[in-house]
Image: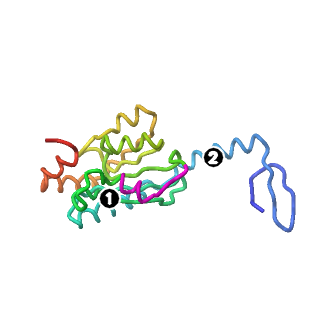
Amino acid sequence: MPLILSDTIARRSKKFVFVPSAHHANRCAGIMQSMSHLLDYSAMLAVAIAEARKGLAEGGIPIGAAIFDASGKLIGAGHNRRVQNGDPSLHGETDAFRNAGRQRSYRNLIMVTTLAPCWYCSGLVRQFSFRKVIVGESGNFQGGIDWLRSLGIEVIDLNSTECFDLLANYIRANPAVWNEDIGED
């Protein structure tokens, strides 16, 4: 039998069963909602950074992404494979999305990406109703984060020096590939 917080305590089979009053049930819901602020976004970003480094090691653009549930459990991860697979649609966010598999709903999932999502990936976030996006950095590329925010999607930019430097070094060495990736001529 589950253990639930409440005012009324009954004893059954040496286990306590707590039945919440309406007041405490509402209070617990508020506490659970505010617990999302206790997630370790840096640890979540580390998963996306590891994916970005995989992409770089494969000869691709170092952008990684990961999708987590509201408790911080990893659902899927991926990295930009445009160069490696010759597939212009295979961005870090779309790779993570594919690897997460079908979900009943995406509203309570968190998209974590090393770089601000481009317009294509911002569209994915909007289309599937993600409510939160954690961004490693937006200095190299602003993408669609202002648009996402205007839609009420929470976007948290961690301003990671590691993410910025990883991509900035790639852009300096591979400007043509980078411009192709972001749709610039």
The answer to whether 75 appears left or right of 51 in the picture is: right
Amino acid type, label 1: His
Name the chief secondary structure element in magenta.
Answer: helix
Position of 96 compared to 109: left or right?
Answer: left
Q: Nearer the viewer, residue 134 or 144?
A: 144
Nearer to us: label 1 or label 2? 1
Residue 183 or residue 70, whichever sits in front: 183
Residue 150 covered by magenta stretch: no
Bounds of the magenta span? 94-104
Contact, CB < 8 Å: mark 1 with mark 2?
Answer: no
Image coordinates of residue 66 in percent, x first then y, are 40, 56
For the view shown, which residue lies furthest in the top direction? 150
Q: Which numbered dot is residue 31?
A: 2
**Residue count near mark 2 (Cα–Cα under 10 Å), binned few <14, some 14–19, many ≥20:** few
Compute the Cα span from label 1 to label 2: 34 Å
Question: For residue 97: magenta?
Answer: yes
Residue drawn where x is 66% and y is 45% of the image? 29
Label 2 amino acid? Ile
Where is residue 51? Give x, y as percent: 33, 62
Percent x, y of residue 57 = 23, 67
Tally the marks: 2
Left or right: residue 23 compared with residue 63: right
Task: Measuring from the top left, give residue 3's x and y in whole percent.
Answer: 75, 59
Residue pictured at 57% horizontal, 45% vertical: 34
In this picture the colour scheme is rainbow
Task: Return the mark for residue 87.
Answer: none
Identify the mark at residue 79; answer none if there is no mark.
1
Q: Circle 1 — which element?
A: strand
